[in-house]
């Protein structure tokens, strides 16, 4: 097996895999791969894999499901406000607009990013990364690695709106005077967040680099 | 670990991901932080987060009450998700850390340690205390326009819990936990 060849921009490295070593995906112990598959980590007893099994198929399925749900999440209302004088549905976007109109600009920008930009960015980024792996792209692996780490880091913040809705519906129940109800859009939105978090987790980052070592 | 004691942080030469960061926190610090977190967690769940005064009536919401509010309106799935990410996962994290670390400090490997550490790693992305705090802020700003909003003791406790859990996570990276395990075995 060839040792990872040095690229002009990358300092010399040797991949553990080429030396017959595995890293435990759970405790990160470095293990000598003897029986290859179906062995377990001597330190933490987790199952050892050279790469996360079925990583591409799992991640693709999760990203596709999230992409489909992204539409109802943004189109359907997430909550309904009833007062003596009015009845109104709020989508994620109309919630942002009403925050901006009430003068809370910083919060409006924050919610806009967390609820609209971040989920979209995650879907596009994960889609691009999957596509790059599928066509065995050898270019820009470092940028894609970085992108994946950003996606993993910011993903959780999209739950912000779900939490805000949960507090609003609990607090605003003043009999017939005013009440707030959850709507189906919130469920679709929560599903998008959960699915994209799972997608980022199930992707094996090393797949981005597997095209490099044989180069 | 002795060979890379000098630099504060080691990055992968290939993808620039952080591989190792020197960690000054001792196992005692981690236990103290987990114990603090447990106290704050209890306070945050016992008392209301906020109360709302409108037309002479007062309504208060607790942390689990927020999940219950969703459940009552027929959205059990979201209710479970909210309860899981804001209450259950932080509680599991705190109790697991206390159980495992106290045993390790006494030089013992707690029964089920492997499974518990694996659970901790898997649960990390699902603890959303800090996200909930920001969501609460958004909800309060929206309501402030139409009603009288009073932040209560649990909101402050939950905010402090957020900081304590962040410190605990910083003091207990996966590598550090396993180093403590290996030391206890030696």
Image (cartoon, coloured by chain):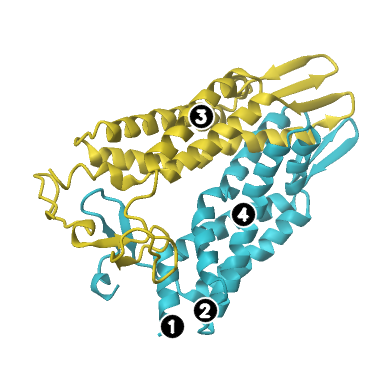
Q: Quadrant of residue A31?
A: bottom left
Q: Secondary structure at mark 2?
A: loop
- Residue A183 percent coordinates (x, y): 71, 25
Kindly indicate whether the residues beneath marks 1 and 3 are on one polypeptide chain.
no
The residue to which callout 1 is attached is B185
The residue to which callout 2 is attached is B109
* Chain (cyan): B
- Is the residue marked by circle 3 packed among few (<14), some (14-19), or many (20+) residues within 10 Å? some
Identify the residue shown where x is 66% and y is 54%. Answer: B88
The residue to which callout 3 is attached is A65
Q: How far is mark 3 from mark 4, CA to CA?
A: 25 Å
**Most foreground residue, B130 or B90:** B90
**Most foreground residue, A100 or B31:** B31
- In the rendered view, would you say B177 is above or below A150? below
Q: Secondary structure at mark 4?
A: helix
- Residue A85 percent coordinates (x, y): 83, 14
Identify the residue shown where x is 23% and y is 45%. Answer: A210
- Residue B146 percent coordinates (x, y): 76, 27
* Chain (yellow): A
Q: Quadrant of residue A38?
A: bottom left
> Which tag, 1 or 2, sits closer to the chain's start?
2
The residue to which callout 4 is attached is B89
Kindly indicate whether the residues beneath marks 3 and 2 are on one polypeptide chain.
no
- Is the residue marked by circle 4 packed among few (<14), some (14-19), or many (20+) residues within 10 Å? some
Q: Chain of mark 2?
A: B
């Amino acid at each position: 097996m060839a040792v990872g060849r040095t690229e002009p921009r990358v300092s010399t490295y040797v991949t553990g895999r080429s030396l017959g070593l595995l890293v435990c995906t759970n405790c990160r112990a470095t293990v000598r791969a003897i029986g290859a598959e179906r062995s377990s980590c001597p330190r933490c007893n987790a199952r050892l894999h050279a790469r996360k099994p079925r990583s591409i198929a799992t991640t693709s399925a999760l990203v596709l499901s999230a992409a489909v749900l992204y539409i109802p999440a943004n189109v359907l209302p997430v909550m309904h406000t009833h007062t003596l004088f009015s009845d109104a549905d709020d989508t994620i976007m109309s919630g942002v607009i009403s925050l901006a109109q009430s003068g809370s600009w910083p919060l409006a920008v924050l919610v806009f990013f967390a609820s609209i930009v971040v989920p979209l960015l995650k879907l596009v980024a994960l889609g691009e990364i999957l596509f790059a792996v599928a066509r065995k792209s050898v270019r820009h692996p470092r940028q894609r690695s970085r992108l994946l780490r950003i996606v993993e880091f910011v993903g959780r913040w999209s739950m912000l709106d779900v939490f805000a809705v949960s507090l609003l519906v609990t607090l605003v129940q003043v009999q017939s005077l005013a009440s707030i109800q959850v709507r189906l859009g919130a469920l679709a939105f929560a599903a998008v967040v959960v699915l994209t978090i799972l997608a980022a987790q199930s992707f094996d980052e090393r797949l981005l680099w597997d095209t490099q070592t044989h180069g | 670990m002795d060979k890379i004691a000098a630099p504060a942080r080691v990055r992968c030469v290939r993808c620039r991901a952080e591989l190792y960061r020197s960690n000054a926190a001792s196992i005692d610090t981690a236990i103290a932080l987990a114990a603090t977190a447990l106290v704050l967690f209890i306070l945050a769940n016992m008392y209301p987060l906020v109360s709302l005064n409108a037309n002479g009536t007062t309504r208060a919401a607790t942390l689990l009450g927020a999940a219950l509010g969703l459940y009552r309106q027929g959205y059990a799935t979201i209710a479970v998700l909210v309860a899981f990410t804001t209450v259950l996962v932080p509680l599991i994290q705190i109790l697991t850390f206390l159980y495992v670390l106290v045993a390790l400090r006494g030089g013992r490997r707690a029964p089920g340690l492997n499974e518990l550490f694996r659970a901790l790693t898997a649960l990390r992305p699902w603890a959303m205390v800090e996200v909930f705090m920001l969501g609460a802020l958004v909800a309060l700003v929206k309501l402030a326009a139409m009603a009288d909003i009073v932040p209560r003791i649990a909101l402050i406790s939950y905010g402090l819990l957020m900081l304590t859990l962040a410190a605990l996570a910083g003091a207990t990276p996966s590598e550090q936990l396993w180093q403590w395990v290996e030391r206890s075995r030696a």
